[in-house]
Amino acid sequence: MDAKVFDYKKGWQNIPDPEGVDRKNEYKDFGTKRVSPERYISHDFMNSEWENLWTKTWLMACSSSDIRNVGDYFNFRIGKESIVVIRSSAGKVSAFYNVCPHRGNKLLYEDFGFVKDIGCRFHGWKFNLDGTNQSVTDSETFRDEVLCYDLDLSSVKVEEECGFVWVTMHEDPMPVREYLGEVAEHLDLYDVGNMNVIRHVHSEWAANWKTGLEAFYETYHLSFIHPQTQGMMEDYFVQMDTWDNGMNRMIVPFIEPSKRQEGHNLINEATNIMLADVGIDPNTFEGSPAEAKKAIQQKKREFSESYNLGYEKYSDAQLTDSFVYGIFPNIQIGCHPEGVFVHKFMPHPTNPEIFTYDTSINYRTVDNPNYHVPGWFGLPEGTDTSGQVRPDIVRYGLGVKPDLGEVLEQDSELIPFVQEGVRSRGFRGPLWSEQEIRLRHFHHEMDKYINQ
């Protein structure tokens, strides 16, 4: 591997002669300036983010599968707010602030659930599923002038797109699909609306939410922090793409041992595991990693024909590589035909140096006993993958090691140390390489909101 051949204006194009979803975007230059460390530690910057960013952008509240039936709701917590999204009628989703207009009592306490209507536990006011007022207890004791005020729940703009439910506190937002741009078409391919959440974990980490996000937006650190990944994926020749509104992507080649290591052109243990996962006996397979990748892609196409999976809409790369999308401001989605991995980096309500790492797995349940969850999903033993029951959100407090698998646990240990360093008087701001262009692109977009 010769780093000198790198042309940052072209970057790496992972797929030869790509078309459609695989194609590489034209390079966009986001400059070379350093951002101030203050944005990772300052309460003032945190407050500016709340007023200018979180309340102005579209935010992913939950998966559509979380509210499939009329009366199903999800309680989305963001910063200082709790926003309820609910299937208010067939084909319609409503959203409102989780607060009673009478005295401000919180209405729904659980993470998700089902209700026939919405009642306040304090004084018994009731509301319909769309947030309109149904009844006021002892209404005759209120003066008419008081009851002339708006008695409905305070609504929040909500849209359903790409298998997810999105909310915004902005009064006049562009449509979600326009906000997502080309990425919406890419996400459509995965039909997330017909997947089910099979695992959902919250864990608190001692760092700013952007410190956490940035670690997931690049593969530059893999060979140093996660050396165990080197046999499975390429971390240097990674295709990076950026779009308007802060949307971005990286295509990480799987079943391609990193060219940083010796023997990258030889079959290794990780490749053997991936072969076995699709039913190819690694003991009898003869060929290179590239041939193994082709064999796995072909095997998945055979699965598609056998189980009617519709994989003909995917490119070969989509069958094996990780197509990882960044949704501004705080989402990363790792997309695979078998399922998608959703990572949210959620700000703490009051402390700029704590965030919640919210991760969930949406799985395409296939009604066939011969079809199984890929081993690389890394699910704990005994995980219910039937899609019949929405799993509870498992929570890990600050300083508690989350049960997220070796790689993510390594991240949870390292990222707080990054935050400590950012706080040092000796740190003058990050120096980003072109391998970290998604980070620079992210901050370029953030500045548009903060500086407005």
Image: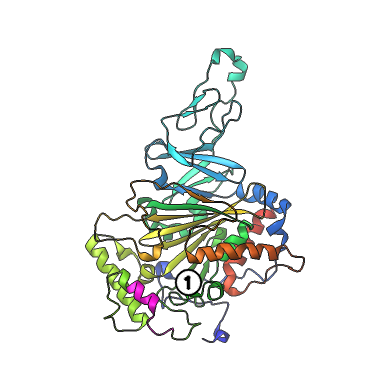
* Residue 264 percent location from the top left of the image: 44, 83
Residues in magenta, as a range: 264-275
Q: Residue 282, relative to residue 214: is it above or below?
A: below
Determine if residue 73 is in view.
no
Provide the secondary structure element on which disc 1 rests: loop
Q: Amino acid at mark 1?
A: Lys
Q: Quadrant of residue 435?
A: bottom right
Residue lying farthest right? 425
Which one is in front, 362 or 172?
A: 362
| Nearer to the camera, 17 or 304 | 304
Q: Nearer the viewer, residue 55 or 401?
A: 401
How many numbered dots are placed on residues in this image? 1
In the image: residue 411, left or right of residue 193: right
| Image vertical order of residue 64 relative to residue 270, above or below | above
Residue plotted at (51% across, 68% down): 241
| Residue at x 60%, y 30% (from the top left corner) | 104
Image point 50% across, 53% down: which residue?
A: 178
Residue 9 picture location, percent across and down: 57, 77
Report x, y in % for residue 194: 35, 51
Within 10 Å of disc 1 (Cα), the crowding (few <14, some 14-19, many 20+) is many
Q: Which residue is mark 1?
A: 24
Q: Is residue 13 left or right of residue 329?
A: left
